[in-house]
């Protein structure tokens, strides 16, 4: 088991299905498909074909393990919007410091939508490699993430 300690942005305890990528998480490219749908089926299938670890996988309700968010200035409003549709991830875990745009989205989701997305950043350079090969993940309120 490996443990990592990060900075808590939105705290909470969680276990569950997770997805890990060693590529930057492009919020706009990943979620643009959900905005183009005419119906809300509770899914958030990743449409970023430049991220083979996540492409065509359902991100809704998952714990996302990412190095950092990348892409446009729309990241915050996109995260808040997917939360308003009920398709938000359970948690976002950043290896590096979370950028202000993505972090603003999880705060908006929490405050405006009442949808808590557990968010921890600064888990360290080794976090993604460990997450890519782990079977289970456990997040604790104090920012400790255990992978086994």
Image: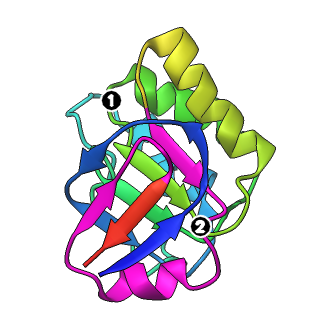
Q: Distance between the residues labelled 1 and 2?
A: 37 Å
Mark nearer the N terminus (1 vs 2): 1
Q: Quadrant of residue 137?
A: bottom left
Measured as percent of width and height from the top left, residue 106 is found at 57, 33
Q: Quadrant of residue 70?
A: bottom right
Query: Taking 54 as reference, is 86 above or below it?
Result: above
Residue 46 in view in this figure: no
| Left or right: where 19 falls relative to 43 | right
Residue 8 in view in this figure: yes
**Tags 1 and 2 touching, CB below 8 Å:** no
Measured as percent of width and height from the top left, residue 74 is found at 72, 39
In this view, the residue in front, 30 or 105, is 105
In this view, the residue in front, 42 or 3, is 3
State the residue at coordinates (33%, 29%).
Answer: 38
Are there few (<14), some (14-19), or many (20+) residues within 10 Å of tag 2?
Answer: many
In this view, the residue in front, 41 or 38, is 41
State the residue at coordinates (48%, 74%).
Answer: 49
Measured as percent of width and height from the top left, residue 55 is found at 39, 71
Numbered disc 2: secondary structure: loop
The quadrant of the picture occupied by the C terminus is: bottom left
Q: Quadrant of residue 122?
A: bottom right
Query: Taking 60 as reference, is 49 above or below it?
Result: below
Badge number at residue 38:
1
Badge number at residue 68:
none
**Range drawn in magenta:** 117-143
Numbered disc 1: secondary structure: loop
| Left or right: where 78 falls relative to 35 | right
The quadrant of the picture occupied by the N terminus is: bottom left
Is residue 129 magenta-colored?
yes
Badge number at residue 123:
2
């Amino acid at each position: 088991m490996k443990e990592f300690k990060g900075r808590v942005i939105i705290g909470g305890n969680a276990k569950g299905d997770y997805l890990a990528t060693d590529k930057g998480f492009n919020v706009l490219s990943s979620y643009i498909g959900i905005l183009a749908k005419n119906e809300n089926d509770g899914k958030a299938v990743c449409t970023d074909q430049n991220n083979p670890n996540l492409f065509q996988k359902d991100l809704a309700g998952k714990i996302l393990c990412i190095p950092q968010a990348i892409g446009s200035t729309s990241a915050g409003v996109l995260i808040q919007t997917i939360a308003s549709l009920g398709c938000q991830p359970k948690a976002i875990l950043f290896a590096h410091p979370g950028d202000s745009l993505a972090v603003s989205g999880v705060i908006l989701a929490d405050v405006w939508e009442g949808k808590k997305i557990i968010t921890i950043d600064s888990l360290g350079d080794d976090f993604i490699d460990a997450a890519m090969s782990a079977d289970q993940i456990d997040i604790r309120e104090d920012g400790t993430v255990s992978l086994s």
